[in-house]
Image (cartoon, rainbow, N blue to C red):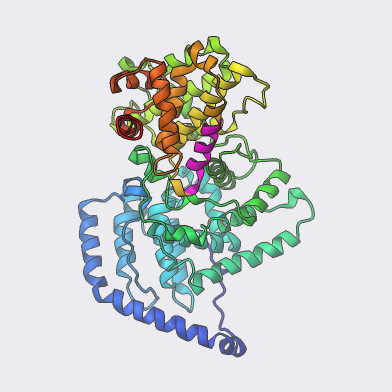
Amino acid sequence: MSSFAFIDVGEPSADRRRRNANQARSLVMTQRRRRERVLKNASARSEQQIAASEKDDEVEAPLTHPQGRSPPVFLTTWNENTTDVFYSALLRQGLQSEGLSNSSILESSLEALRGYNKPVTIHMHKLINHVIQIIWPKYWPSKDLGQASPLVNEWWPMFSHNPAVFHGFLYAAAVHHDDLLGRTEISQSREILLHKHEAFKRLQVAINDIRRPEAINESFVLAMAYLGMESDEHDRDRESVESCPFNAPGILQSIQWTRHYAYAKENAHIQAATRLIGLKGGLDGLSLPLAKSMAINDLQIAAKYIRKPVFPFWDIAEIVRAFEDPNVNAVPEDTNQLPTCLGFQSLLSLGLPLQLSGILRRTALISRKIDFYSRGELLQADFHVLLCERNYVHHNLLSTPSAIEIGLVNQEHHIYECCRIGGLLFSTGVLYPLPPSTGAPNRLVQIAKRVVESISLETCMLGGGKLLIWMIVLAAIMARDTIERPWFLKRLKAMLAMENITSWSDLKSALVTFLWMDSACDDAAKCLYEDLSRPPFL
């Protein structure tokens, strides 16, 4: 049985009680009023929850919740003298559906908390529920640890035995929960801030004790990463559902947690964790939980700021091997001919390097796979492998050097930058969707504008015209509701005239030869084309 003996449950001193009297009185009254409101209907709601679980033993996956928002979570009290109806419902609905019995490691660990002389608080119980069902359902150990994934085997001891990880994890869960709901009800509560303070205090002691890089405890670096999972206060005022310019596949918008992870910040905790990992030689050789967490965070921050990731691409070896298997996530045979390859192939004679061409072809393939997955037509579908390949492609696009960095000039420079920035526009809008308020779309729009301004007429006349049209269309879509959109529309009208494109069908035929997904791009592109027939573009 895992132990949580590090939780401080001792009686506070008289002096401490006096210091905290006013704050405690306010907190107690707030919780009492909240409890009275919630418990009024808790019994009826829990009975409905249990009835629903008897009809369906499976936990609803987080991917099914639109825009990555969590399902309703009940606030209940829990102590050793009362029966928690929600905990019973959770076991019946969630834990048992995963094959966990009453003797499972997870349940035993939670049961161990009942033995302490103060109850598990409302917030702690709510966050454990949120984590189990929504954030990291795969992180909790199964009935047989021998059959659990290596990630679980390495992460669970860190969580259940290391105080810094435990407290930091609860704080990260609170921030995630509040971000999804667009509020600060839990994450800014006194209780959760104490968890944050406790994690920080233990990290400070650990850092002061570091004498050499090899002595760095990975659990403390993981806790540091958890403490870095927070959004700016201004972000909490954004709309509950922020629409993106492209109609990205819903499955990607959900897994992206656009109300939380899209707002990753490179704060002091993340910077410190990155430096410590650098001292240890990078992600290779780290424990799986730490390597996975930092690899994902590195990609998220790089995607937001449109810059190269700090670390090379990393994921669990078994998943990486799976996405290299042609039989996993296979596109049906009669659709293997990708029209998106033709446009880039024709540019090889104009100086497009083979390496960038290969990255764009890989991007075209993963977009095709995601499109088929969304329609339920992918063969031997594995979403985790698909997501890994998506991350690999976006990581490669962000890591691709600029034309200046590799010394390209004149026409080759223009062709290269059109392809590179166009690939990032497509990936950021469709495959790795980031909402406008992250700043990533606007950064790309400004970069695309500079590329268009620098391209010569000669490049367009020698075969780069349709490539430029494709990039302008993507940039104009991403520039929705900005002052840059009319600028791109004006350039698009001129390029369509130069290429003698006079209808939507002609434009669509040109666009699909590059990176394109009909379901994600067509509607927005049609709106662009229709705008060209209205003032001031008539």
Percent coordinates x, y for residue 329 in the rendering = 38, 27
Q: Is residue 440 magenta?
A: yes
In the rendered structure, the answer to whether residue 135 lies left or right of residue 302 reads left
Q: Nearer the viewer, residue 388 or 365?
A: 365
Q: Residue at x 69, y 48 (%)?
A: 275
Quadrant assignment, res 494: top left
375 lies above or below 267: above
In terms of depth relative to the viewer, which is nearer, 163 or 280? 280
Is 132 left or right of 454, judged from the image as shown?
left
Q: Is residue 407 left or right of residue 162?
A: right
Relative image position of residue 380 (x, y in whole percent): 35, 28
> Majority secondary structure of the magenta segment?
helix
Q: Is residue 200 visible?
A: yes
Query: In the rendered view of the protein, which quadrant contains the C terminus?
Result: top left
Note whether 468 is above or below 48 in the view shown: above
Total marks in image: 0
Q: Which residue is located at x 46 percent, y 45 percent?
A: 148
Residue 372: in sight, yes or no? Answer: no
532 up-or-down from 161: above or below: above
Q: Which residues are magenta?
A: 438-450
x, y percent for residue 287: 60, 45
Left or right, 181 with respect to 287, comes to left
Q: Position of residue 418 (x, y in %)?
A: 52, 24
Whether residue 69 appears in magenta in the rendering, the answer is no
